Amino acid sequence: MNRPGQSRIAAAVFFCLACTASAQVTSERLVNSAKEPQNWMTYSGDYSGKRFSALDQINTANAPSLIPRWVYQLGSTGKMETSPLEVDGVLYATGPDDRAFALDARTGRPLWIYQRQLPGDIRPCCGRVNRGLAILGGKVFMGTLDAHVVAMDAKTGAVIWDVAAADYRTGNSFTVAPLAVKNLMIIGVSGGEYGIRGFIDAYDAATGQRKWRFYTVPGPGEPGHDTWQGESWKVGGAPAWNTGTYDPGSNLLYWPTGNPSPSNRGAGRAGDNLYSNCLLALDADTGKLKWYFQFTKHDEHDWDATQVPVMLDAGDKHLIVQANRNGFFYVLDRSTGKLISATEYGKQTWSDSKDTEGRPIAKKDASPTLTGHTVCPGALGSTNFLAPSYSPQTRTFYLTARDQCDIFSTAPQPYEPGHAFYGSAYFPSEEAEPYLGFLKGIDPATGEIKGKFQHTSPTWSGVLSTAGGLVFTGDAEGNFIAFDASNLKPLWHFQMGAAVYAPPIAFAIDGKEFVIIAAGSALYAFGLP
Amino acid sequence: MLKCWQAALFASISLAFSLQAFAQKNPLAGDPKAAKAGESEFRINCALCHGLGAKGGGRGPDLTRAVKKHTHTDADMFQVISNGIPGTAMPANGTNGQGVGMTEREIWQIIAYLRSQEVKASPASLGNTARGKELFYGDANCSMCHMVQGKGGRLGPDLTGVAGSRTREAIIDSVRNPSRRLAWGLTEATKEFPQEYETLTVVTADGKQIKGVTLNEDSFTVQIMDMSENLHLLEKDKLRSFQKTRESAMPKYTTDVLGDKDLHDVVAFLTSLEAK
């Protein structure tokens, strides 16, 4: 059935001679994903955000012999930021302009393709991108650039429900991969460049009915409202555009939030501007806030805290860690939100002191000025949405990092619905050193940089680590690279012909391990000969 | 295939549309409030290359000049800001992947701002064009490495259109301090940063030393043009040594090497190419 405004190619039947691709993804399977390392069922591979594969068939000994197994071309333009899912032999992914598709994961042959027909007047920030799907029951779920949440039949791509979450004309959109928890579909909004009022939503996966909404900018009478000057809360931003994590033991969602609006101008919004640039701990059933931690108060440099928070356990300590865009690596107690440590992992000049809790605080002269003021990191941050990875094997947190400073110069703008609302310009210093890009390995116990590999230029690729002693990432020059996780020495690389803006995943079919990554407008699958 | 009447209709609609575009005037022309708003939009969207005051930066031309290379009418400016200039670093609105892009009204605000900043008189020529040409191809040795209108070397950037994309001050600075801001070379469609004109010295497995300019590079390979314009396509792990520097291969033209008058003559020559 073709619905108005949508086109779809569906292969109703597909044959998989050696596997059965019919088992439904239950919430129990998602909680116990460690029992089926052959599948990759959530954005980060499991609820903890580790982006670690327990598969070890591809390892340090045989990685040099990796070969491409298939390539799937979307035939689109624009960046692919997708982190695919793979369940029982079927791979689900997204592409620019709200494409979604399912492939035979063994061969790359498509089963169905969904292409949303978007309104002509959407203006999403930073590319018409999407970072992936969630799966639960027999459905896959996608947030769209026109701020809808859509559930599709996982076998055909047919739309089962389609719910408008917010008005795209005022700058709301979805680019995030949703997270399936119990019977709910959790999703956070994008639009921090437009002066939206940010939120995190939970929808009944069966019906599309909204079960709760947490506004990331508190309204009148709510705790935190007094951290906003006057009416500034109404256009306060604090989007939630990257996928959070979930602790089934405590039933807490850990969801990160982005910059206050206007993103680069603090005048007019005096105060800490809660809950911008925070990690939020929310009750998954109700959306009630249990605790929050704000990384950058009253941000004027666009340092979203939307990096994936990763849950780690060290002895009896239940931790959550984040390599923040502001250049610091934070370790928190995930039961209480109490800060344990904050250590510098990249070049930064904005902070030279900490508050009584140990949180880095901004220098007085770090704000943008009319003539321009150089601050490190720049507006793109020491890292960004690029998914990190933690290997329990090496006890190392791996991430893509960049050293870049920018000149921040004020440029006041009035708020107008749906218009850009930055309030400041930023651009590289003419005299600056070239921007540097790295794969870094951090010891979460100490914050120490255990190893690093310098790319030719900064990359937007995420990172995967595996039990084969490997770390995978891509680069801006189009290489997909396998590193020895112990020392970050490259063991293998393949030139894909386009810059990488996506993270890798791993899965196995019939005992054969695959590693997948998007580059340009294609998905590449690699395996052993 | 289009039928005859469809083709005629299409042609007449296209003509009408292009005439309308040709006649398009800025609806915000002369509005000081629009120009003020346009200044902020300019700083956010354009100053990266064209400088905070629109007087040109290291990457983009001075837009306060009344005579511009690509744009004469408001409609031209609107078209260029909307769609970019193919083959140059000027991107189409909203396509650099980092920002939001501008609405039509915001583009008109920027045009109102730029019109308010224009300096009506063209700056007087500071040099002798004919002598500059002689120096370029002669004693100053510029053409050893730089091409102009198909004549010259390949090692450095082709300078035929340089005056359209750089200010006079930026050109002079590049001659006096070539390493301060390395020129951009190859730009790849999906890559964030263009390749810069970095200088490389490598020693191959058989002990041969190669010095040249980087045409392109990744973590595992490098593509070099050596000082004799030979191409070397190399794998880094097969090299004995690999040294990259941000010192430009271009010598620093101090006033001892090229006096101010001579330099102004060379710049006058390069600028004259833009006017043709």
Image (cartoon, coloured by chain):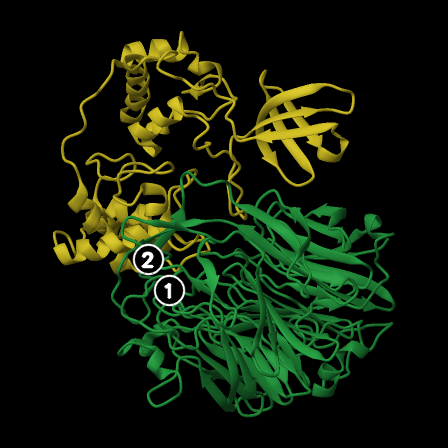
Chain colours: A green, B yellow
Q: Which residue is mark 1?
A: A263
Does residue A418 lie above or below B148 as drawn? below
Q: Residue furthest front?
A: A356
- Chain letter behind tag 1: A
Question: What number of labels is visible?
Answer: 2
- Pick the residue in front: A140 or A153: A140
In the rendered image, residues at marks 2 and 1 fall on the same chain: yes
* Residue A53 pos. (x, y %): 76, 67
- Chain letter behind tag 2: A
**Left or right position of A426 against B15:** right
C-beta proximity under 8 Å, tags 2 and 1: yes
Question: Looking at numbered disc 2 in the image, what kind of residue is underneath it?
Answer: Ser
Residue A3 seen in this snapshot: no
Q: At numbered mark 1, what does the secondary structure look like: helix, strand or loop?
A: loop
Does residue B231 lie above or below A482 as drawn? above
- Pick the residue in front: B142 or A466: A466
Task: Please give the label number shown on residue A424.
Answer: 2
Does residue A262 lie above or below B161 as drawn? below
- Pick the residue in front: B64 or A232: A232
Q: Residues within 10 Å of mark 1 (few under 14, many from 20)?
A: many
- Give the quarter of the figure containing the N terminus of chain A: bottom right
Residue A208 seen in this snapshot: yes
* Residue A470 pos. (x, y %): 78, 57
Does residue B12 lie above or below A115 as drawn? above
What is the CA distance from the residue labelled 2 to the residue labelled 1?
Answer: 8 Å
- Pick the residue in front: B135 or A231: A231
